[in-house]
């Protein structure tokens, strides 16, 4: 075998190796996506727990099947051409036969792609129509979700509840459907509401009202985040959806309607809250804090996380968040208040009474 032929076989081997590496990467990614929640903390788009997410999953399988078949056909033809028509000693240096004006070939590579795109378009339009035009039953829970830099505000107009970052909804029994319909607004720039196991992405755009809905079939906590770059801390604009049983959801609503807890032992901390710039951004029921630039803190300790999911809601993290927000979430737009240690401890003790 000549050096030229050895070089050609090395090129072929390199191309085949590259294809195998790509296939291995695809299989590994698919394995991560299909792992069980206990094995993989990443939200699993192939494990839907809500009707919109199920429709998207089923459509994804259909698209993957078609594109996978196209991939196999193209790769097979490529491998066949590489092996069959490689340069041979008898034809070295000769130009291969040229084919011009083949009507059949030109029709095939024009009509077949058009038909494939048309089928994918119709299938996608059907799924979009089924999700976007779903009927809202009288039993639906209505929530207004407002995207801020960099946190989520949730308002339940019919229930008189305001909370942040952790959305609570009832499980939707198919026999007694209680879906949650969300009105999506933005307070500043573009955001995108995305909880992969419950629904697809829907943007929140300034001066525009968008909508989405979910009907979770299983209780539990489902995680998601803003899927539209909205600034420095876009990556830590997380959200949690707690799907509760009807009894748990009713109890949560009742607790959220209660006024803020006022503990005389934490009066010093309340005084710190009411006499600093905290009240310009945050609200606590029953105090002079009525700000809306930041999350409502009336029931802060009922939430599992702080800083839009960036840290667990523990004493240590809460104190650090008050002392130096940038230590947890750089660029979060929450200023460090420069409090003394005594005032900081008093403020944290007060916030920990807000359940």
Image (cartoon, rainbow, N blue to C red):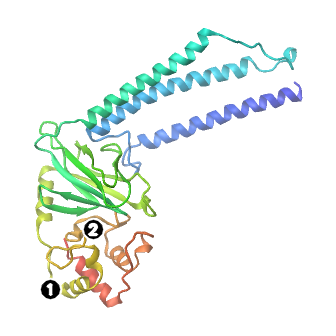
Say which mark, if any, is on residue 264.
1
Per the image, the residue denoted by label 2 is: 295
Which residue appears at 59% of the width and 23% of the height?
74
Q: Could you tell whether 147 is left or right of 8 in the image?
A: left
Q: Is residue 215 above or below residue 220?
A: above
Sequence-first disc among 1 and 2: 1
Residue 170, percent across and down?
Answer: 17, 49
Which residue appears at 43% of the width and 23% of the height?
118
Q: Is residue 116 above or below residue 297?
A: above
The quadrant of the image that shows the C terminus is: bottom left
The quadrant of the image that shows the N terminus is: top right
Q: How many marks?
A: 2
Are dots 1 and 2 in contact, CB under 8 Å? no
Q: Residues within 10 Å of mark 1 (few under 14, many from 20)?
A: few
**Disc nearest the viewer among 1 and 2:** 2
- Residue 244 visible, this orientation: no
Q: Could you tell whether 320 is left or right of 153 in the image?
A: right
- Pick the residue in front: 103 or 14: 103
Q: Is residue 207 above or below residue 295?
A: above
- Pick the residue in front: 88 or 205: 205
- Residue projecting furthest to the front: 207
Residue 315: name its quadrant: bottom left
C-alpha span from label 1 to label 2: 24 Å
Residue 116, percent across and down?
Answer: 46, 22
């Amino acid at each position: 075998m000549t050096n030229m032929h050895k070089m050609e076989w090395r090129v072929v081997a390199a191309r085949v190796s590259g294809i195998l590496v790509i296939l291995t990467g695809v299989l590994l990614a698919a394995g991560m996506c299909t792992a069980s929640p206990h094995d993989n903390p990443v939200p699993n788009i192939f494990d839907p727990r809500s009707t919109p997410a199920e429709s998207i999953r089923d459509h994804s399988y259909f698209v993957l099947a078609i594109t996978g078949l196209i991939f196999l056909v193209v790769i097979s033809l490529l491998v066949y051409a590489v092996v069959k028509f490689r340069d041979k000693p008898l034809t070295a240096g000769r130009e291969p036969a040229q084919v011009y004006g083949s009507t059949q070939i030109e029709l095939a590579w024009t009509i077949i792609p058009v038909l494939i795109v048309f089928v994918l378009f119709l299938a996608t339009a059907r799924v979009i129509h089924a999700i976007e035009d779903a009927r809202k039953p009288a039993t639906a829970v209505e929530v207004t979700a407002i995207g801020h830099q960099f946190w989520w505000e949730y308002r339940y107009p019919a229930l008189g509840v305001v909370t942040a970052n952790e959305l609570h909804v009832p499980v939707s029994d198919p026999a007694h459907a209680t879906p949650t319909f969300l009105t999506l607004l933005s307070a500043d720039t573009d955001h995108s509401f995305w909880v992969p196991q419950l629904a697809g992405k829907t943007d929140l755009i300034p001066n525009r009202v968008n909508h989405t809905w979910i009907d979770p079939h299983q209780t539990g906590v489902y995680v998601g985040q803003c899927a539209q770059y909205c600034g420095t801390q876009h990556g830590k604009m997380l959200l949690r959806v707690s799907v509760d049983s009807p009894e748990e959801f009713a109890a949560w609503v009742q607790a959220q309607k209660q006024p803020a807890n006022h503990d005389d032992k934490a009066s010093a901390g309340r005084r710190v809250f009411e006499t600093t710039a905290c009240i310009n951004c945050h609200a606590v029921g029953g105090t002079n804090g009525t700000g809306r630039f930041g999350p409502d803190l009336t029931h802060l300790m009922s939430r599992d996380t702080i800083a839009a999911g960036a840290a667990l809601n523990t004493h240590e993290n809460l104190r650090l968040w008050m002392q130096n927000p940038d230590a947890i979430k750089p660029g979060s737009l929450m200023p460090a208040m420069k409090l003394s240690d005594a005032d900081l401890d008093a403020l944290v003790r007060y916030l920990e009474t807000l359940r």
